[in-house]
Amino acid sequence: MSSAESEIEDAPSSYKSIVWQHFGFPVTRQDEGFATAVLTEKQKMLEIASLKLIIDVATRWNSSMDMLERYLVQHAAITATLLSTEVRKNAHQLDTQAYLTVPATSVPSTVICVIIMASTNLVGKKGANSPIWQYFGFRTNERGQPRDTSEVVCRICGQVIRAKDAQTTNLHDHLRVHHPAEYSSLPVSSSRTTEPRRNQPTVSEVFAKITKYKRERERWKQCTDAVTRYLAKEMVSFNTVEKSTFKAMLQTFDKQYELPGRKYFSKTAVPKMYNDIRANILAELDDVEYLALTTDMWSSCNMMPYMSVTAHYVSKEWTLKSKCLQTSFMPESHTPDNLEEALQESIHEWKIEEKKISCITTDNGANVIAAIRQLKLPWLSCFGHNLNIAINNSLKKQQASTDQAFGVCRAVNTAFSHSWWRRRELSKAQEELKLPQHSLITVIFKTLRQ
């Protein structure tokens, strides 16, 4: 039979005339043109280039390679077309099981593709309304009935999915993870608007585990700035960033963030943050009309002497602000000349015009008062310091009557502070009497300079 005869089908058997041995009817191949139209539609829907498929030709040495490459590019659209209900309905003959293996000698191993269409012995769910069932079916028994309705087989890859009572949740999960192109062709419904549960990580999650942010990325800068603020505000050691639990915590927050070492924070991140904040404060101090300064000498827990300087001002938005400008190490003797030099250096370093300084508030130390007078700036005594002195002086006048009361309070505090059982009973009594659950306070008297 010639190729022309292959396009003609015999006349029906009801036609008895012998002449019909030499005649026939042309075969109407509507499915081929229809499938092409559906393929074009799927290409547009999936935003894939609208290209025709290529058939290999023996006389062209690279035609097989072109055919395979074109098939791999159009795989999603081809699969969606072959699985569409319209094409299956109009096709005269559709091979439901096709294998395509790309040899490693022709294409790199990363693009080797094996596509398995579902077996012909699968039956669909009876009375199924969900469009998801066009991609799934059941294995049949000897009577052609579903063998096990709790085991659903994917028509695309042949994988068995557990689906109790033929529920579609696992089917949506399988299609979304393994066949995203087909999943995108499903109509939007309530089952797709809610995020389905996932039993395995997505491609983006797996990618996140092996890909770290580059340091020029904005997200990396945000995470690093947050860690820098934590180190500075909480005044914790730079070694914190090298502790395993701290790193594990950050990995829980963002697996793509790679924490720098402690030297980066001590040499780069914290100094940069200081310079940025300093520049902002300098801009604010330059805009204010007047400001006041406070200063005080103090000692650290290891008895190292320091001097702090704080600026107080009202912003243009009428907000009272206080900024600790600096804390300087003061190993020299706290003479008026040394204190004057330290204060003068702080004022010049922060570019504060002396005409803007309304006053400098300190305690009543003779050395610091003399230093401010040498600067020829207004001085104001600290009200809180004076109030504390006044209270202590008044208590000293009533010392005979107050010593006994303070002694009783200290003895009670000592008794409770050294006994967990007493503190527990105190808490119970407070609860029974509906009193606030407060701990006792111990007063520590300090000798103040007059």
Image (cartoon, rainbow, N blue to C red):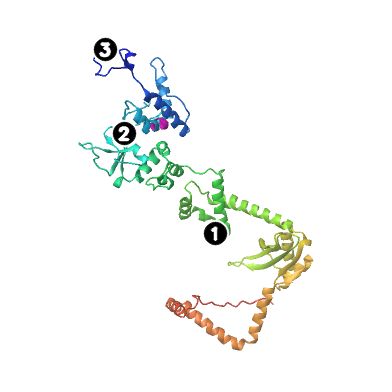
Q: Earlier in the sequence, mark 3 or mark 1?
A: 3
Where's the N terminus, which quadrant?
top left
Secondary structure, mark 1, is loop
Q: Which mark is residue 324?
A: none
Q: Residue at x 34, y 39 (%)?
A: 133
Q: Residue at x 53, y 82 (%)?
A: 409
Q: Which residue is mark 3?
A: 21
Q: Would residue 170 appear left or right of 395 to someone viewing this image?
A: left
Please identify the quarter of the rendering in which residue 374 is found: bottom right
Q: Residue furthest left?
A: 142
Foreground disc of the pair 2, 3: 3
Q: Amino acid at mark 3?
A: Gln
Is residue 16 visible in the rendered structure shown here?
A: yes
Q: Would residue 358 appear left or right of 96 to someone viewing this image?
A: right
Please identify the quarter of the rendering in which residue 7 is found: top left
Q: Which residue is mark 2?
A: 118
Q: Amino acid at mark 1?
A: Val
Secondary structure, mark 2, is loop
Where's the C terminus, which quadrant?
bottom right
